[in-house]
Amino acid sequence: METTLVIMAAGMGSRFGSLKQMQSVDEQGRGLLEYSVFDAKQAGFDRVVFIIRKFFADDFKATVGKACEKHLPCTYVYQELDAALPTGFTLPEGREKPWGTGHAVLCAKDAVKTPFGVINADDYYGKEAFVALHRHLTEGAGTCMVAFNLKNTLSENGTVSRGVCEVKNGQLVSITEHTALDRSSPFSPDTPVSMNMWGFFPSFFEELEAGFAPFVQNLENPLKGEYFLPSVVDKTLKRGECVTVRTTSEKWYGITYREDLDALKAALGEKRAAGLYEGL
């Protein structure tokens, strides 16, 4: 069965200070996305769909795209503010921020016809996580989420956003987005959290589309309100649909903040030294 990896790479990098999608993370100048695509290929994924913005598309394709196309075929779609808006809706004056992760995936609707995984562009998930995700897409049914332990996903350099999960018997019970988590949070270190590593089937696009119109028509914050992917999944849970949770003990690394770079580079260096990225 063919599978697609959808990568959300349209973020503006406001906390990082620049477009981190194209940030070098090793001595050879490779970006984090090349590591993710390499891991996805080894796990069994067949192609990649990048969700980006038009204003940096040429640079992205010439750098990240060129590197990743050595490993898997790549397609590009664009998350623009006017994409997939309901008829008659007018963009709020002054809105510059993208509509969020749920809208990002919705923008890939016409490019994805197979079971698909979804990941962020600025997170290192680890090989084990990609294997778990691909296995579900080829052997399982319905939506799945790869869960990480909260303690393995925190930055030493500031707060992070995570979907805090309640899990029972391998099934997701609820997921709540928290936007300011650090090591002083009230949650247990082993609390399962979402890192936006999801597995879906094409019918999920209908769910995204159905929820986006009422979201934009009832905005509480017209300039910064976001249509979060975990919130869309939570609505399906409340209707009684099942979401399988695949757990991983992998440690997350990312570049939420510029200060995160050193830890990421060191971790990737250790993994290369251990032979995990031969052939990259």
Image (cartoon, helix red, strand yellow):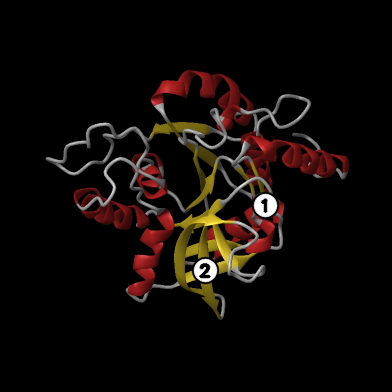
Q: Report the residue that reaches farthest toward the front.
A: 184
Residue underneath mark 1: 252
Horizontally, is 99 left or right of 89 in the view? right
Question: Residue at 70% of width from left, 28% of height from top?
Answer: 30
Q: Which secondary structure, mark 2?
A: strand
Estimate the x, y position of residue 104 in percent, counting from the top left: 39, 43
Horizontally, is 178 left or right of 208 in the view? right
Q: How far apart are the two marked residues, 1 and 2, measured between alpha carbons?
A: 17 Å
Question: Residue at 45% of width from left, 65% of height from top?
Answer: 176
Binning the other alpha carbons within 10 Å of mark 2 as few (below 14), some (14 to 19) or many (20 upward) gives many
Amino acid, disc 2: Cys
Estimate the x, y position of residue 39 in percent, counting from the top left: 67, 45
Residue 31 position (above or below residue 190): above
As drawn, the label of residue 127 is none
Estimate the x, y position of residue 125 in percent, counting from the top left: 65, 50
Res 107 → quadrant:
top left
Question: Residue at 19% of width from left, 50% of height from top?
Answer: 217
Locate the C terminus by quadrant: top right
Residue underneath mark 2: 165
Res 83 → quadrant:
top left
Sequence-earlier tag: 1 or 2: 2
Estimate the x, y position of residue 56 in percent, counting from the top left: 46, 22
Amino acid, disc 1: Trp
Question: Residue at 43% of width from left, 73% of height from top?
Answer: 242
Residue 227 position (above or below residue 194): above
Res 51 → quadrant:
top left
The residue lying toward the viewer, choosing from 178 and 173, is 178
Q: Which secondary structure, mark 1?
A: loop
